[in-house]
Image (spheres, rainbow, N blue to C red):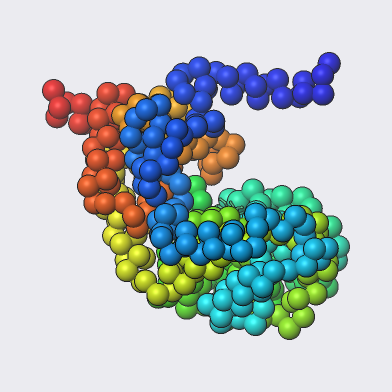
Amino acid sequence: MTILAKYTQLRESYHKMAAIGRDPFSVQFDGILSPTEGMLNGRRTILLGTNNYLGLTFDQSCIDKGVEALVEQGTGTTGSRIANGSYTGHGDLEKALADFYGRQHCMVFTTGYQANLGIISTLVGKDDILVIDGDSHASIYDAAKMTTGQVVRFRHNDPDDLYKRLRRLSDHPGNKLVVVEGIYSMLGDTAPLKEFAQVKREAGAFLLVDEAHSMGVLGETGRGLAEEVGVEADVDFIVGTFSKSLGAVGGFCVSDLPDFDILRVACRPYMFTASLPPSVIATSLQALKRLREEPGLRLRLNSNSRRLYEGLRNLGFQVGPVANPIVAVALPTKELAIAFWNGLLEAGLYLNLALPPATPNSLALLRTSVSAAHTPQQIDTAIELFAQVGRRLGVLPGLVQAAE
Ligand SMILES: Cc1ncc(COP(=O)(O)O)c(C=O)c1O
């Protein structure tokens, strides 16, 4: 028996899925033309599944800053900050993020995944309790695996359930860290953060909000859900990523906790991996500046999100509960979702296929993410393609009749 034998079942279901058409988990673009278009098998394809919320991946000022840093400082740091030292850009970006969030401290990580993994697993020690939403991102679940503390899950977006669980733990002497997300990455739903903040206050717990999908999207200045609903003072730690609204790669955590910087010599996913290359730091710093200086990007994004959400909902598709930039369409079966995804791709529309067990309630989802860079015409084309494929596959029976 080989060491990979345990993956036999996974391999079989993976192959079965890939046999229906293209392999949704190894799409390879021939080229990327813009934040919203790529070439795939020689075909111009609309990109509607890239989390490129502000469309900054081709922003000329970001590119210029990245090129400048690349030329002046080289391709990489070739080690971690505790071993190889930091470049000025690392500190500048941390200062800029702390300033943006109005916090004292910031730590930058090499990915958003590592930011959650590192911060959460290091904050929660063996006598503490980590309390997470049941629909948490894999990086939060993996932090839960890594922590030496106890882990408690509460029902997704349910403040009453969180309250009950924290009350049961009230005699426990350790610290409690509650972790939620601003916008959830599969269905695009937002956390009831006001209610969570109240529960956190009553229980004397700490609160961490992962604003990966809400930074640059929600809030008057784009700081995320906590800003949008006015509870920033109750949030002890904000985690975010550079891989979505900032169009790069990397992650961060900001906090006002006085001794926060001690984590730099305690947090293994910060200490034992190479730091971000200067070019990535430079583009992220410039993208943050663009985010702050151009609220119009956010307005365009939100207008595009509403256009897509309402367009798909009006066709009769089952979409998530809120018109956020993540618009997910639920289909009755996995097989139908795979066929639908293939149909859209053949028609020139790329988005994400999300299947159980990676989805909430075992839903089969076509997950889209909208960008400020999409034109209204691109959004309308996407809606039309959904309608065409939906009719062809009989997912929209009313429309099948209307079309005949
Ligand atoms: C909610 C959430 N947190 C963290 C991450 C990890 O971010 P990154 O891809 O930048 O590592 C993701 C990635 O999709 C996410 O959806």
In this rendering, is residue 115 above or below 354? below
Q: Which image quarter is the N terminus in?
A: top right
Q: How many marks?
A: 0
Choose between 84 and 157: the one closer to the eye. Answer: 84
Closer-to-camera residue (84/251)? 84
Drawn side of residue 220 relative to residue 14, left or right: left
Q: Position of residue 361 (x, y in %)?
A: 53, 41
Identified at 58% across, 55% down, the residue is: 249
Query: Where is residue 280 drawn, in percent x and y?
Result: 58, 59
Of 83 and 367, the residue lying toward us: 83
- Whether residue 386 can be seen here: yes
Residue 60 location, x and y as percent?
41, 60
User: For the point 52% across and 35% down, which residue is it?
Assistant: 355
Q: Is residue 226 left or right of residue 298?
A: right
Of the 4 image quadrants, the one containing the C terminus is top left
Residue at x-position 59% and y-position 59% = 71
Residue with the most extreme front position: 71
Q: Height in image: 32 above or below 262?
A: above
Quarter of the image for residue 240 reads bottom right
Q: Is residue 154 visible?
A: no
Question: Going by the image, does 251 lie left or right of 122?
Answer: left
* Front residue of 54 and 394: 54
Q: Position of residue 342 (x, y in %)?
A: 40, 26
Residue 128 lies in what quarter of the image?
bottom right
Residue at (74%, 76%) from the top-left corner? 260
Q: Quadrant of residue 252?
A: bottom right
